[in-house]
């Protein structure tokens, strides 16, 4: 059985990574989404174990010491981390796993998973990005300002990724992500066992 592929969806705040991810998963239910752990307080409507595992800072710091995260980062004053055991087990089972994480975390994941697929989601324009960040209305003015200036400086990380997807329309962006995953699954280096099987059949005949 082939190992699953790690797909990392990342990009600046307000690019719409979360919405694109949801649409990707709706169209490809066999993909596995990794639920992160965070010290951020739940927003209204967010569900424990679905959106995040919500925990306190002492517990998170204990988990860092116990090496329980594949990657973790401090984003806007809160910790966020990807549970290592969950992701590694799914990959071993041959399942493809999606992480929706920030850029610092993606760079750490890249070191551990050089064969992962790193997709950078961008908004169609900076004006649109500002509108989206403001439109969320879940953050204070100060947080909005912070998110916008951070998003701007994060754009320079584009070159560290394998693919760029412009999120002008969620369904189109999701289709592009699905096409990328399909193409990656067809790569020769991910299918060497298939070649060996075909060779064996040929020799057996
Ligand atoms: P939010 O608080 O809006 O849900 O997320 C804030 C940022 O944290 C987003 O950019 C989101 O992608 C990122 N994030 C969510 N989970 C993780 C994680 O496990 N690791 C890292 N590094 N970033 C995460």
Image (spheres, grey):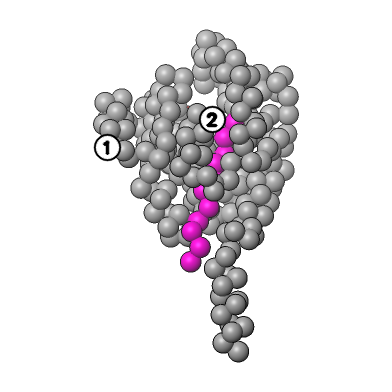
**Rendering coords of residue 4 (x, y %):** 50, 56
Q: Which residue sits at x=58%, y=63%?
A: 191
Residue 20 visible from this viewpoint = no
Percent across and percent down for residue 144 are 56, 15
Which residue is label 1 attached to? Answer: 66
Residue 150's place in the image compared with 103, above or below, is above
Q: Residue at x 56, y 72 (%)?
A: 196
Disc 1 residue crowd, few under 14, some 14–19, many 20+, Cα 10 Å: few
- Mark 2 Cβ inside 8 Å of ligand 1: yes
Instruction: Measuring from the top left, give residue 41's x and y in whole percent.
Output: 39, 25
Above-or-below relation of 17 to 141: below
Distance between mark 2 and mark 1 Cα atoms:
23 Å
Q: In this orientation, which residue lies closer to the viewer: 157 or 28? A: 157
Answer whether residue 25 is visible to the viewer in this image. yes
| 160 is higher (above) or lower (below) than 6 | above
Q: Disc 2 marks which residue? A: 103
Magenta segment boundaries in residue numbering: 1-11
């Amino acid at each position: 059985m082939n190992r699953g592929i790690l797909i990392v969806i990342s990009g600046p705040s307000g690019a719409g990574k979360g919405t694109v991810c949801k649409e990707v998963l709706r169209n490809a239910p066999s993909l596995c989404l990794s639920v992160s752990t965070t010290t951020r307080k739940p927003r209204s409507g967010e569900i424990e174990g679905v959106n995040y595992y919500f925990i306190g800072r002492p517990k998170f710091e204990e988990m860092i010491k116990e090496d329980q995260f594949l990657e973790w980062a401090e984003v806007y004053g809160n910790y966020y981390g990807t549970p290592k055991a969950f992701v590694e087990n799914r990959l071993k089972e041959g399942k493809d796993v999606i992480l929706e994480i920030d850029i610092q975390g993606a760079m750490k994941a890249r070191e551990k998973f050089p064969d992962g697929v790193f997709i950078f989601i961008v908004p169609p324009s900076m004006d649109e990005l500002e509108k989206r960040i403001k439109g969320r209305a879940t953050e204070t003015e100060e947080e909005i300002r912070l998110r916008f200036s951070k998003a701007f400086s994060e754009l320079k990380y584009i070159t560290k990724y394998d693919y760029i997807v412009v999120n002008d329309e969620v369904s189109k962006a999701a289709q592009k992500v699905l096409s990328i995953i399909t193409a990656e699954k067809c790569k020769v280096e991910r299918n060497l066992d298939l070649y060996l099987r075909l060779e064996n059949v040929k020799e057996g005949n």
